[in-house]
Image: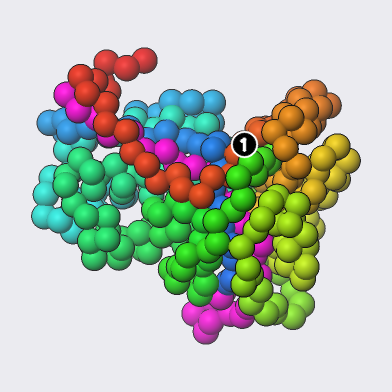
Amino acid sequence: MTAIRAYAAAKLNLYLHVLGRREDGYHLLDSLVAFASAHDLVEVESTPYFSLQLHGPHSLPLLMEDTESNLVTKAVFRLAEALGRKPHVTVKLTKNLPLASGIGGGSADAAATLRALCALWDVPLNHPAVTELAAKLGADVPVCVGSRTSYFAGTGTDLSPAPDLPEDCWVVLVNPGVSMPTPAVFEARDGAFSEPARLTTSFTDVRELAALLKEGRRNDLTPPAARLSPVITQVLAALDSTAGCLLSRMSGSGATCFGLYVDFDHAVAAAELIGGIRPGWWVQPAALLNDLSGLEVLEGVTLLDWP
């Protein structure tokens, strides 16, 4: 048997500005999105029926839910329907990333499923059915399908290339064990809307990247998220207090925050320090990479036999 493995990389909003709100209630955004080496895993193979296997340290909440409500299941069934074929695949999802944490976990899983299915079913990733479905599954799904450093605008479907990040970009991701429902964070937001802040230059090194991100760029959702969950302020302070941290910021609607570090050694040391002080927090050092859309073909593998 042949299985396809796709990486559902953590999505980080290096900045996130809220530009306005449409009449239908959806907000208009401007964001520079990067992807980290911390990831969930999605593995797919053809089988006589559909099944979803859930594994990993953050799979328990999903095991308590109806399988049909999982975004991975929706991706399989809706793509199969759009292509006029049966959803006869087994999907193994290894859930390493915390849920509802602002790093696109569920969206990244759905996007990785779409990439894997396209490879398995020999469908171009830019097929109209795939593009349309990605937008319907969630605002973060289109950018996660590409899993490349990108700008997104509008409600998340207006994507454009961004300058490559410099090599050796190391971050520490920290989630304090808090799930933040995105609608509640947007609802708690007040004040004026922001302007777009796209960067017009490339980045020579991580220090320049951090400096540019600090120049009038921020995450507009941090204040409302911190009001709903004050521990976010503690996470940002913990990151700021570590040696070599050039920038700390919340991603998406929270509660995961990240620190951008001068190098690998400082990132690892910071992760060990924060994890030691706060053993209940999820702490993960990771690299920011410009393209995490790759797939692996696993020959002679049967997912049903895997532990």
Residue 226 shows up from this direction: yes
Residue sitting nearer the eye, 215 or 53: 215
- Position of 107 with respect to 82 (left or right) is right
Judged by its main secondary structure, the magenta piece is: strand
Residue 103 lies, in percent from the top left, at 57, 48
Q: Amino acid at mark 1?
A: Ala
Q: Is residue 110 above or below residue 40?
A: below
Rendering quarter of residue 282 = top right
Residue 14 lies, in percent from the top left, at 65, 57
Residue sitting nearer the eye, 166 or 180: 166
Residue drawn at the location 58% of the way across and 80% of the way down: 21
Residue drawn at the location 72% of the way across and 37% of the way down: 263
Q: Which residue is mark 1?
A: 286
Residue 229 shows up from this direction: no
Residue 260 lies, in percent from the top left, at 72, 46
As helix, strand or loop, the secondary structure at mark 1 comes to strand
- Residue that protrudes farthest toward the bottom in the picture: 23
Give the residues drawn in magenta, as a range: 1-28
- Position of 2 with respect to 191 (left or right) is left
Looking at the figure, which quarter contains the N terminus? top left
Residue drawn at the location 37% of the way across and 42% of the way down: 294
Q: Is residue 230 above or below residue 244?
A: below
Residue drawn at the location 66% of the way across and 62% of the way down: 15
Which colouring convention does the figure follow?
A: rainbow
